[in-house]
Structures are given as C-alpha cells and as structure tokens.
Amino acid sequence: MAASTVTLAPGRWALAVHGGAGTIARSTPEAEAPYHAGLRAALAAGQAVLEQGGTALDAVVAAVVALEDCPLFNAGHGAVFTADETHELDAGVMDGSNRAAGALAGVTTLRNPVLGALEVLRDGRCVLMGGALADAWCAARGVAAVAPGYFSTAHRRAQLHAVRARDREATVLDHTGAASQRGTGGETRMGTVGAVALDRHGHLAAATSTGGMTNKRPGRIGDTPIVGAGVFADDATCAVSTTGTGEHFIRGCVAHDVHARIAYGGLALPQAAERAIAGSLAPLGGSGGLVAVDRQGRIAMPFNSAGMYRAWAREGEAAASAVFEPPGRG
Ligand code: ASP
C-alpha cells in the first residue's frame, strides 16, 4: 500500500491507528461514516501531541483514549460483554525508547484502561497486572473509574444475545453476528483499538486496548495486554499494535514477530509486517491485522481478515493525506 513506501525525513512524526479488523464488505458508506469519524478523532488527538513535540508514548495513549471513549469501538465505553454479561477489559502500552511496558488484564472499572496501563509502565515495578487488585491500584493512583454500567451499551448486549441464541458456547470477535470463532479463524467485525507512533525525537511507541471477544469466558485474557503478541515497540526496529483472534496472536507472538523479522532477518517494515501475518498468524488459523511504524516513518497495515479500520497521518504531508483507507478495500 502507498503508505508503506514513503520514508520520512528525520525529525518528522508519523502516526497510525486502528479500530479493529473484520467483516465490513457489506457495509454502506453511511454505516461506515461514524467509524471513520472516530478514527479521525483519534488521529487528531495523537497528532496534537506529536505536533507539539510530545512523545510517541503520549501520542499513542491520547489516540487510544479517544477510541476508548467512542462507543462504536470494542474498547473502553464500547467494550463487548462476557458470557456472564459483564465486561473485562485489557490494554497494553510499550515505549520503544527503553522497551518499558505496562499492561492490564481483566479490569472492570477503569474508564480508560490504557491510562491504567500507562500508570503501570510509569511505576515500572511490574509490567502486567490483572483483575480487581489492578483496578484498585490504578484507582488509588488517580486513574478515573466508572460504574460497570458505563460499559453496558445496548448494541453490545444485543450482540451478546444474538451470539448466544445461535450457539451458547461461541465466542466472537466483536460485532455483526456472523460466524463463531472457535479456533477456526471465522470472525465478524473486530473492534479492538490501537495506535503506533514515531515522534520528532526518533522514538517509537505502541498502545492497544480491547473489551476482548463477545461471550468470552470470564477470566479469559487475549493478546492485547501481552507484550510481543498484541503490542510491541523498540526504537531499533518498529512499533506494532494488533487486532484479531487473540489466542492466535499470542501463540504466533505476532507483534514481536514483526520486530524479529527486521532485527534478525534484515527485512524492511512492509515485508516484515506482511510476513508476520502470512507466516506466523495465518498458519495457526488466525485472523486479523496490525498497524506498525518504523524509525523511518514507514507505516504498514496488513491484515488477512475481510477488512480493517485504519488511518494514518505523517508530518509534512497535506492534511488530506491523513488517509482513511476504506476497510476491506485496502
Ligand atoms: N485481539 C482481541 C482479543 O482477542 C480481540 C480483537 O482484536 O477484537 O481479545
């Protein structure tokens, strides 16, 4: 894709976001428009940080906060339901400048799980926290909490009931009521969100946030908060945020796989990203995609699902080049 081929001059920023991968082939432009608007709002939030000389880490967090606050995406406000009609959210962030990382799994009260993950990173004593004690620790550090009802949007509850009416045991990737996943790679729309950025100082960062999979087993944790699976960043190579069938991304170490193909295999980012999907995700039966940026500002956004919501912006390019690539046609 065109965005992969451009190398930025040093000192310029780059940013890419995603709103999940999945089946959108039958969507109309009218139905897609709010998703486009949500992605553009996230780009604007991250871009504002980068244009002021802020860090890639702060930019990806700002972008993901915007996506978590949008009820259309499966993260934060729009998180999907578990089989128990509850919400368990996962998020991870990584700073490529020092490979510091912070992540939360199965939190239930944080309005913006990515801000909790950032607190874990900043604290630095551990990388991954989970469950009610993680909620409490974050709240004590000032991360905003909400009542569980905040996450209970009507369309997500209808989605859960539709899935369970078809197959009580099925877990599906976000929305629209198509095939169950059950390890087959079959999927519907995935709404996990993420962002990757290169800042003017040459640093990379990545952030990913999700409600997981509709009707998931309570306690199930996906790839999103797992460093090397759902999120990864290293200034020497790239920053990566993934979306898709989480178990396959964990087993394929997909985010780290992009890094490894650059670091050890000498590939350029576009090839490394495409081969990670084709060579490490697809053979396991996995479905999904990723956004990635390298230290030259090249952006790659491959997927093997039927579509993926992605958008990107780069310094020095006209505002119109903050292109939204229509999902399923990219
Ligand atoms: N990767 C997420 C998970 O497995 C789901 C998604 O990307 O929509 O929890």
Image (cartoon, rainbow, N blue to C red):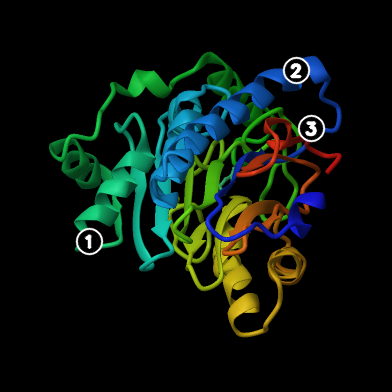
Q: Quadrant of residue 300?
A: bottom right
Q: What residue is rendered at 34% in x and 29% in y?
A: 111
Q: What residue is rendered at 77% in x and 66% in y?
A: 278
Label 2, label 3: how far apart the Cα atoms are: 10 Å
The residue lying toward the viewer, choosing from 82 and 328, is 328
Q: Position of residue 187 (x, y in %)?
A: 72, 43
Mark identifier at residue 40: none
Q: Nearer the viewer, mark 1 or mark 3?
A: 1
Q: Is residue 320 above or below residue 223?
A: above
Horizontally, residue 65 falls left or right of residue 327, namely left
Dot 2: element: helix
Q: Is residue 244 above or below residue 170?
A: below
Horizontally, residue 205 falls left or right of residue 311, namely left
Q: Amino acid at mark 3?
A: Ile
The disc, 2 or 3, on the residue closer to the chain's N-terminal end is 3
Q: Position of residue 232 (x, y in %)?
A: 49, 62
The disc, 1 or 2, on the residue closer to the chain's N-terminal end is 2
Q: Is residue 262 above or below residue 304?
A: below
Dot 3: element: loop
Q: Position of residue 189 (x, y in %)?
A: 69, 35
**Residue linked to disc 1:** 124
Q: Is residue 262 above or below residue 316?
A: below
For the image shown, how many numbered marks are present on the structure?
Answer: 3
Q: Quadrant of residue 252?
A: bottom right
**Residue linked to disc 2:** 31
Image quarter where the C terminus lies is top right
Q: Is mark 1 within 8 Å of ligand 1?
A: no
- Residue at far bottom of view: 264
Callout 1 environment at 10 Å: few (<14), some (14 to 19), or many (20+)?
Answer: few
Label 1, label 2: how far apart the Cα atoms are: 42 Å
